[in-house]
Image (cartoon, rainbow, N blue to C red):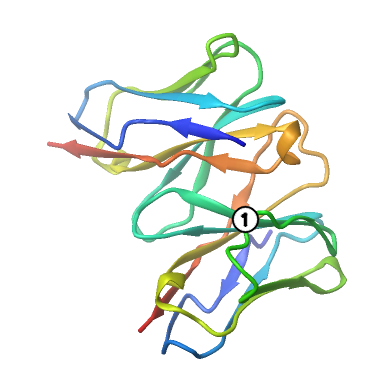
């Protein structure tokens, strides 16, 4: 099967940088995705890594190391609106390409 | 372009009753997924349709849950009879036939089911 581990909660102040780590175990790894979910809202896609390295999209960046089965999401210049839950998710060919999600990290941004 | 829509947004039913959730994916998306999030925990996979066929239903909790996707368009998820532990937010997501490098899944707003 597939399993993912990420911290349950992170608190930071506006303007700070937060790194959310995600370690995974799966066979037939295909890619690692990140999703953001505000309370009461739908999960929305943030980023995707299939190859090792850093992908940057504005204030958010995502990193993947396939050899370490590890990735992280970096949130820079935190804003109050970034308070949300962040999920890492893996796709694997062994699991029919479905997304398997981690438990989510709740990020609380304080003024 | 319309996104993934789910109906109803909320449902409160008594234990033992039946509830049917509906999902309309983005037009042209062959892949349709059902997920459930319970009490702020993980987003747990339920099942995956490719067009009208069930590709993977390994996440369905038990035979009280029945999912269909008529003609490869909208999908329904029926819970019969509902139990207290079925409460949670049920999300539907869709994606294009070829995931390619974007691998983006589009989620609906979810149906919040409360069984009392």
Does residue B62 appear to the left or right of B40 in the view shown? right
Left or right: A19 in relation to B107? left
Left or right? Give the position of A28 relative to A21.
Answer: right
Q: Quadrant of the N terminus of chain A?
A: top right
Q: Nearer the viewer, residue A29 or A111?
A: A29
Q: How many marks?
A: 1
Q: Residues within 10 Å of mark 1 (few under 14, many from 20)?
A: some
The residue carrying mark 1 is B59
**In the depicted structure, whether residue B23 falls above or below residue A22:** below
Residue B69, horizontal then vertical, whole percent: 78, 70
Looking at the image, which residue is at 34% across and 59% down? B39
Q: Position of residue B50 (x, y in %)?
A: 82, 55
Q: Quadrant of the C terminus of chain A?
A: top left
The residue nearer to you, when weighing A63 against A96, is A96
Q: Is residue A37 above or below residue A54?
A: below
Q: Is residue A111 above or below residue B86?
A: above
Q: Quadrant of residue B114?
A: bottom left
Residue located 52% across and 52% down the image: B44
Query: The numbered mark 1 sits on a residue in which chain?
Result: B
The picture places residue A65, in percent across and down from the top left corner, at 55, 11
Image point (65%, 14%), residue name: A51
Can residue B29 be seen from the camera position used here? no
- Label 1, secondary structure: give it: loop
The structure residue drawn at horizontal position 75% and vertical position 32%, both measured from the top left corner, is A93
Residue closest to the far left: A111
Q: Quadrant of residue B30?
A: bottom right
């Amino acid at each position: 099967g597939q399993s993912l581990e990420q911290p349950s909660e992170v608190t930071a102040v506006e303007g700070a940088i937060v790194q959310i780590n995600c370690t995974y175990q799966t066979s037939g790894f295909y890619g690692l995705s990140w999703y953001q979910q505000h309370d009461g809202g739908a999960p929305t896609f943030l980023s995707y890594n299939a190859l090792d390295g850093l992908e940057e999209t504005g204030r958010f960046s995502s990193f993947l190391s396939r050899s370490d089965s590890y990735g992280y999401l970096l949130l820079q210049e935190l804003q109050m609106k970034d308070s949300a839950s962040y999920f890492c998710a893996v796709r694997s060919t062994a699991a029919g390409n479905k997304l398997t999600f981690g438990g989510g990290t709740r990020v609380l941004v304080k003024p | 372009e319309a996104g993934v829509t789910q109906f109803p947004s909320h449902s409160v039913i008594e234990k033992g009753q039946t509830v049917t959730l509906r999902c309309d994916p983005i037009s042209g998306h062959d892949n349709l997924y059902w997920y459930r999030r319970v009490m702020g925990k993980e987003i747990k996979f339920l099942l995956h349709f490719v067009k009208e066929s069930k590709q993977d239903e390994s996440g369905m909790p038990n035979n009280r849950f029945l999912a269909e996707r008529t003609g490869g368009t909208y999908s329904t998820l029926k819970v019969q009879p509902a139990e207290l532990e079925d409460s949670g937010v049920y999300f539907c997501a869709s994606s294009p036939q070829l995931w390619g490098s974007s691998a983006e899944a589009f989620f609906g707003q979810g149906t919040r089911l409360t069984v009392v």
